[in-house]
Amino acid sequence: MQALPGFRDFLPEDCARRNYIFSRWREVARRYGFVEWEGPLLEPTDLYKKKSGEEIVDQLFNFTDKGEREVALRPELTPTLARLVAAHEREFKKPLKWFSIGQFFRYEKQQRGRLREHFQLNCDVIGETDLAADIELIALCIDVLRAFGFTEKDFVVRVSDREFWTDFLGEKGVPSDRWDELLTVIDKSGREPREKTAAKLGTLANSVFAILSSSGKSEKLDKLVDGLRGRGLADFVAVDVEIVRGLAYYTGIVFEVFDRARKLRAIAGGGRYDNLIGQLSDGAVSMPALGFAMGDVVLGELIDQTPQAREKIKKAITTAGKIDIYIVIAKEERRADALKQIQQLRDHGYSIDYSLVREKVGRQFQAAEETSAVLALLYGDEWPQIKMKNLATREESLINHDTLLDSVKKFFNAARST
Ligand code: HAM
């Protein structure tokens, strides 16, 4: 039996990598004053049909549940957030700055960088129209990536503005009910043959191609880049109006993050969705909003191909995998005494490992090395004393079993201060 296509098994090493990614995500989101929240994994299919757009609806993992409800595993978090905010709007002071880390499911064709499940960090700001919020959000996205060791040489945030395009379509006299369809064509233009895009754009083709080749410009985008320049982050961004985003609910500034070498799929994407909360609540609550999501799959690929990021994750995983103490039971008669003290040490927060059954002393020391334990405690002929061995320096000393906790605390305090 194998895992389903596009689903991953997480062996301990993979879990360690995932924990590392989640820790950096959480750490930087908190640094920006964002608070954590979570929604359900299963939602009514209608939540996505209403506003996510055709692409997402085609990719839904959906079914009819035993109560005859049409349900879907969540492909993204934004509709859930909009639903939740509309329902609890009065309970919170605006703007809300919320983040979430969770798993998402899309029935996509499995390919490099795209699976049928993935994890995302979502960061959203609700209740603020000012461009300052867009700048803050993009700065957060950049800083999240910097926390993995990436620099402006490794990734770029391509920023754009949907309003730039809707203004253009308005000026050209295109009726607004065709805008979504044309925005999708522009969004796909970089990935499709030029003739195909031209055919879909009709009479607009030449002007659209002219704009795309000059990469576009607007006062709002200039201000956005200036805001990031003020924080020393301008080198991480590039204005590029080819970015329109596949999801239907975006209304203003949009952005996507790519590796500089342009070998990988998007690492993150987001933007403003000022109408979604109003639309999902049928006009009951209307609130401006913006956010982005970063996926773990492409991020993992970029880590693997960026030397300094690879070094950083390796080091962090090795440190996180270390246990504090390995207990070596040299005399089986001492097992009960050792277990009593193992319990006491664990109660005080030390991570401890030991052999569950009788084992040769040499094998136990070998296991201590394998777990990267810092300290070994040996229960044997020395009892009522215990032999304490610093596994890094090989130094040994004898301590009294009834003052063990103090000795261990002293050891780790000294180890931490060096
Ligand atoms: P999205 O661009 O669909 O945006 O997804 C965000 C990121 O999730 C992508 O850049 C990619 O790294 C990752 N991702 C998406 N699909 C897959 C997949 N099948 N396999 C692996 N990784 C994937 C959203 O989901 C929006 N809801 C983001 C947002 C939040 N907008 C406002 N707030």
Image (cartoon, rainbow, N blue to C red):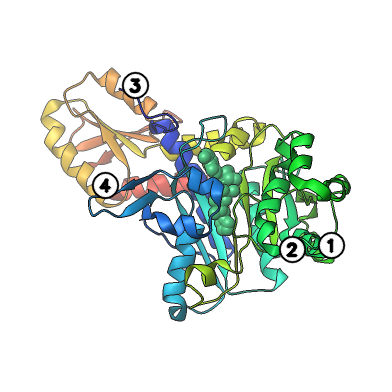
Residue that label 3 marks = 366
| Mark 4 vs 3, N-terminal side | 4
Residue that label 1 marks = 218
Q: Amino acid at mark 2?
A: Glu
Residue that label 2 marks = 163
Q: Position of residue 158 (x, y in %)?
A: 74, 49
Q: Position of residue 105 (x, y in %)?
A: 44, 43
Question: Element under label 1?
Answer: loop
Residue that label 4 marks = 346
Q: Amino acid at mark 4?
A: Arg
Quadrant of the image occupied by residue 137: bottom right
Q: Position of residue 205 (x, y in %)?
A: 82, 46
Image marks 1 and 3: residues in contact by CB distance under 8 Å = no
Q: Nearer the viewer, mark 1 or mark 2?
A: 2
Quadrant assignment for the N terminus: top left
In this rendering, the answer to whether 215 lies above or below 10 is below
| Mark 1 vs 2, N-terminal side | 2
Mark 2 to mark 4 CA distance (whole Å): 58 Å
| Mark 3 vs 2, N-terminal side | 2
Mark 4 to mark 3 CA distance (whole Å): 22 Å
| Mark 4 vs 1, N-terminal side | 1
Mark 3 to mark 2 CA distance (whole Å): 64 Å
Question: Could you tell me which residue is drawn at 53 percent across and 69 percent down?
Answer: 279
Question: Element under label 2?
Answer: helix
Q: Is residue 176 left or right of residue 113?
A: right
Image marks 1 and 2: residues in contact by CB distance under 8 Å = yes
CB at disc 2 and ligand 1 closer than 8 Å: no
